[in-house]
Every structure is written in C-alpha cells, then in structure tokens.
Amino acid sequence: MRTITVRAPVNIAVIKYWGKSDEDLILPLNDSVSTTLSMDELCTTTTIAIGSDLSKNRFWLNDEEIPIEKRLAKVVDEAKKLAQSKWLDNEFVHICSKNNFPTAAGLASSASGLACLAFGFCKLFAIDDLDTISRLARLGSGSACRSIYGGIVQWVAGNDHQTSIATPIISNDAWPEIRILLLIVDDHKKAVSSTGGMQTSYKTSDLLQHRIKTIPSKVHRIKEAIFAKDFERFAEITMKDSNSFHAICQDTYPPIKYLNETSWLIVHFIHFLNDYFKRNVAAYTFDAGPNACIYCLETFVETLISLIQNLFPLSNNSKLLVNGAKWTQSLGSEYDSLLQDFIEKYRRPNAIKAIIHTKLGSGPQVVSESFDELSLFGTNALPRVYEK
C-alpha cells in the first residue's frame, strides 16, 4: 500500500472570481488574484492511501466519513488517468483531510482541501509539473488552483482545460511586510454555497456582465501595485473589488447576503481608520461569507489588533491568535477623542469569535510518505480516531 501526507494553504482572493463559463471544467468568467496565507496558522492536511487491499474509495473530513461528492470523485478519476499504469484497476483509495479552521464558513476551505488532494495525488505518482497540479486542483474547486503557489497568485481564466491555470505573481518573501488579520465573525456553514451563488448570479445579475469587463484593468493595476509594493493602491483596489463582488450578490435574484451587521461594521471601521490616518493603512476583503480578511503593513499590525480588540472585545483571549504581536487592552492617550469616541459608540463585545494574525505563506508541502505519527491514518489506512 502506498501513502502520502501533505498540507496545503488557504488563499484569499483580492480580485474575486464569481461565475463560470464552463461548469464541468470550472473555467472562470474572469481572471482572479489571491494571497496565499501562511500554513503556520491555516492549512488543510490530507493523507492519501492507495492499495489493492482496500475494498472501495472512502473519504473522511475532520474525522467524519462523508460520501465522495461529484467534484472530489472527478479529481480522483483524473488523478488515476494521470497516474496511468502506476494506479492499477484493482486499487482503491482512502482519503482523510483535516482543516485547522472553520469549514465552509468563508475561509476558502474547499481551496486548501482540493489543492491538498491534487498535490498529494501528483506527488504520490511523481508528477511535479505545477501546471498539471494546478489544473487537477481546479477540477475540484476553482480557487484551489491558486493554492498550489505561495505568495500572491493570478488565476488566468483561459478558454479550455489546458490554458486555465494559476501562475505566481510574487513569492511569499517578496513582500514580507504584508500582514493579514482574519476576523472570524461566524464559523457556521453558510446558507448559500459559492457554487450555487455563482450559478444564480450568472443567470440573473446584470452587474456581473459589467464586472467581467472591468477585471482585466483591475488585475493589471493591482499587479502594478504589488510589484511596486504600493500598499495604498493595493488596499484601494482590494476594497473596491470586494464591494463590487458583494454588490453582484445583492443584484442576484433572489439576492444573496453573505455579509452580516458585524461585517458591515468592519467595513465602516476600516474606512474610518483610513480617513483618520489620511491614508490607506488597512484594507478589507470578504469572500462568500461574513468573515473579514484585513490587510495591513507590519508597522501597523499591533495598532490594528489593539483597535479591533477594543472595538470587538473577545470573551476568551485564547481566541486571539496574534503570534507574538503586542497589543493593548485599553486605548492610551496617543489616540485622540475622535477615534476613542468611535470605538465607544460602536463597541460590540463578542461579535467576532476569533482574530487570527498571519502573513503570506508558501505553497503545499509533503509532510510524510509513510504511516508514521504525521500521517492521519494508522497502518490499516483508517483515521487514527478509530484506533482509540
């Protein structure tokens, strides 16, 4: 029996993709740009086992066995084709995945999960071509193709299976000053899935057609800002694109509401801060969920954590995952009454469940190639929870 354990990162889009030109191949209507987050804080870990002594294909997510749905099955089938004679007809696969973050709550769990699976299959069969891995990941989840690379990544929409691939813009160490705060507003599964939402928007939203025409210019401008390390331009383009995406959700019939009151307060707060400091010191973006991804520079992150923790006090500081960043529980005299009054007026204790501080990270990694302590499986190719 052969096995491999790998891990893959979450990515957050700053130029979103919403809608497909081909549902089967998952070809997007437009290019997108994303940031790959450090796996030290957020990742999916997956163990794959393949052997003739397994009786059927099985899948476990976070220790719960669930049916193999259509897209996952497609990745398995395509991986078998890529493996050719290395994957025999009488061999089946067991897959076990674990996320260290909320699944299906707007934190791109499908991206890291399917990237992990595609990367694991390819590494198991000595396929190292990143374009091939990117295509395989895309067949499972469109945004997964971007998690094959670290740093900041562009998904080129293309017009067929061969040309729709991700490509790196910069590596994770090319802009080391970037810091990212994830504000977990709700860790429950969203009511409208991304796939379902995209399909409805494509059929009913007039704004979506307009947005598609604006994306090439946005991608060009944000890449210029990234290469120049121009955070203020990067921030403005990121926020405007997030707003555009959620406007399309509202324009969809019936409308889709991914943001809640706390999400909108975060938007209001970031714009207030940027006005207060007379420059873009922070930027928000929201995927298909209420959780916020906030970008800032390293020099501002401790101030930002302090302000957020004062605006949204957590009931349990163990949920404040700041990775060594210092912050203050109370605002000092360095902040004038305008800022303090804003926080006093809008303070909302326990409105967010966690604050996670992270940075740009690398692409997927091989963790283990045996049934050792790093594998999610025991030697029987079943999750270790069954051994207890």
Image: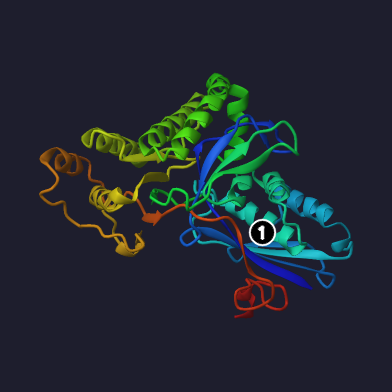
Q: Residue at x 12, y 42 (%)?
A: 336
Q: Quadrant of residue 277?
A: top left
The spot of residue 287 in percent (x, y) is 49, 40
Between 9 and 77, which is closer to the camera in this rendering?
9
Q: Give the x, y percent position of residue 286.
A: 44, 40
Q: Quadrant of residue 228?
A: top left
| Colour scheme shown | rainbow
Up-down: is 262 above or below 216?
A: below
- Residue occupied by mark 1: 66
Residue positioned 72% across, 36% down in the render:
163
Q: Is residue 106 visible?
A: yes
Q: In terms of secondary structure, where does tag 1 sit?
A: loop
From the image, which quarter does the N terminus lie in? Answer: bottom right
User: For this rendering, which residue is in front, 174 or 345?
Assistant: 174
Identify the amino acid type marked 1: Ile
Name the one closer to the observer, 73 or 224: 224
Q: Is residue 368 above or below residue 107?
A: below
Residue located at (74% from left, 64% from top):
124
Residue 141, given in percent of the width and then of the height, sits at 65, 45
Q: Is residue 81 above or below residue 341?
A: below
Which corner quadrant holds the C terminus? bottom right
Horizontal side, residue 6 vs residue 274: left or right: right
Rate crowding at label 1 as few (under 14), some (14 to 19) or many (20 or more) other CA atoms within 10 Å.
few
